[in-house]
Amino acid sequence: MSFFSLIGGLAAFLTTAAYVPQAYKTIKTRATAALSLPTYVMLFVGACLWATYGLHIGDLPVIVSNIVTAALAGIILVLKLTAKPTEENTDATSAP
């Protein structure tokens, strides 16, 4: 394995692992009001496209990291889309 393959693998691991704390917290608390819907839609679609590209070029780090990222973003996206209106407006309704 070349030096640059190691750098690519480490970069893929770190950028994918960066979403784990957000996904864990969102799954645990179900709190999605502060999360941006457009951000997670774009992240999910982008990760799916990157995974498709990785399959096309046969690059395992690109494939795996983007499938994991798409799964994490997809979970958060589903929670965001299925949140009850009262959960989404908690910040707005608690203002004086």
Image: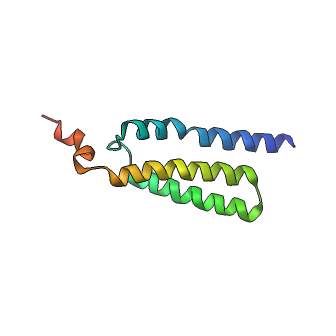
Q: Residue at x 37, y 50 (%)?
A: 80
Image location of residue 89, percent across then percent down: 23, 45
Q: Give the mark count.
A: 0
Name the image quarter holding the C terminus. top left
Image color mode: rainbow
Q: Is residue 1 left or right of residue 48?
A: right
Image location of residue 31, percent across then percent down: 34, 40
Q: Residue at x 55, y 53 (%)?
A: 70
Residue located farthest toward the left when viewing the structure as drawn: 96
Image location of residue 91, percent across then percent down: 24, 39
Q: Residue at x 41, y 53 (%)?
A: 78
Residue located farthest toward the right when viewing the structure as drawn: 1
Q: Is residue 91 left or right of residue 42?
A: left
Up-down relation of residue 79 to residue 18 (above or below): below
Q: Quadrant of residue 35?
A: top left
Up-down relation of residue 34 to residue 57 (above or below): above
Image location of residue 75, percent across then percent down: 47, 49
In this view, the residue in front, 11 or 83, is 83
Name the image quarter holding the N terminus. top right
Residue located farthest toward the bottom when viewing the structure as drawn: 56
Q: Residue at x 56, y 58 (%)?
A: 46
